Amino acid sequence: MKKAVSHPQKQGPTTIDILTIFPEFFGQVFDFGIIRRAKNAGIVEIKIHDIRQFAADKHKMTDDRPFGGGDGMVMKPEPIFAAVEHLLGTTVREEYPQGTRVILLSPQGVPFRQSAARELADTANRLILICGRYEGVDERVNEVLVTDEISIGDYVLSGGEPAAIVLTDAIVRLLPNALGSETSAVNDSFSNGLLDCPHYTRPAEFRGLRVPEVLLTGNHKEIENWRREKALEKTRKNRPDLLKGENGDM
């Protein structure tokens, strides 16, 4: 996250506002599965806003050439400031309503982790996600408006829209009552510092491949131990970095 701040436990439903120059990008992407159920249950409200509608000039310009030269275009500050002011009534971070976070989605941001998704789900009543484009966003947006600058990975996308979908999905599924089972999120990959263990379902044998016998015993203690060992095994293989400082054991 951009800065270490103490956030009180949030109250009430969550509103997610997404600022983009391509609102059609989102289409029906939030109308399926867990997010749809959370919307229908009043757990979350997701609103898409066209940044161009907040541009003051007749051509609705949202980008311009960078000062100092260089390739590409940079997103202008004025429409983004106007959009945030329209949504919150202020462009001063210290005056944001409690539980409000304004997030710039950027390759230069702090890597997004499950712990960050959990913290946002637990503390934020209002999330404003700013989708950058081109060579980026005028740095004054980051300096004045943004509470968190977040990256979803060490690669560059054409814009912040896919990242906004990723953040929304990761956060919404952690909201209270969004999942059918209260323990589902607890057992997710990364929630306990490890990747998830392998999972199997019926049939018990498929093309000569059998489900591990321990899962068929009904011995919950043995099953729990097997799952932990397999989670450690998968983590050592695919993400050994998660075990640093733990001597390869948790």
Image (cartoon, rainbow, N blue to C red):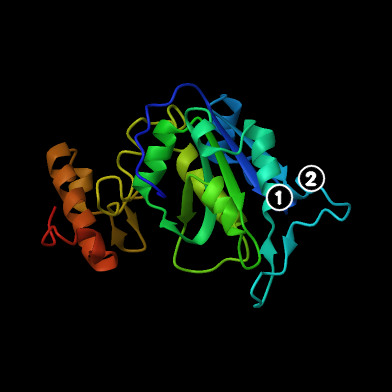
Residue 132, quarter of the rendered image: bottom right
Mark 1 lies on residue: 78
96 versus 170 height, above or below: above
Q: Left or right? Give the position of 218 relative to 1.
A: left
Please give left or right for residue 144 compared with residue 121 in the image: right
Residue 178 location (% of width, % of height): 47, 31
| Relative image position of residue 104 (x, y in whole percent) | 54, 51
Q: Residue furthest right?
A: 58
Residues 145 and 35: in front is 145
Compute the Cα span from label 1 to label 2.
Answer: 11 Å
Q: Vertical placement of 176 versus 160: above or below? A: above
Q: State the residue at coordinates (65%, 61%).
A: 133
Q: Nearer the viewer, mark 1 or mark 2?
A: 1
**Disc 1 residue type?**
Glu
Q: Which residue is mark 2?
A: 53
Q: Disc 2 on helix, strand or loop?
A: helix
* Residue 201 left/right relative to 22: left
Q: Are marks 1 and 2 in contact (CB under 8 Å)?
A: no
| Residue at image coords 16%, 54% | 229
The local crowd at label 1, few if under 14, some if 14 to 19, many if 20 or more residues have their Cα within 10 Å, is some
Q: Is 185 above or below relative to 209?
A: above
Q: Whole-percent x and y of residue 198?
A: 29, 54
Q: Is residue 244 visible?
A: yes
Helix, strand or loop under label 1:
helix
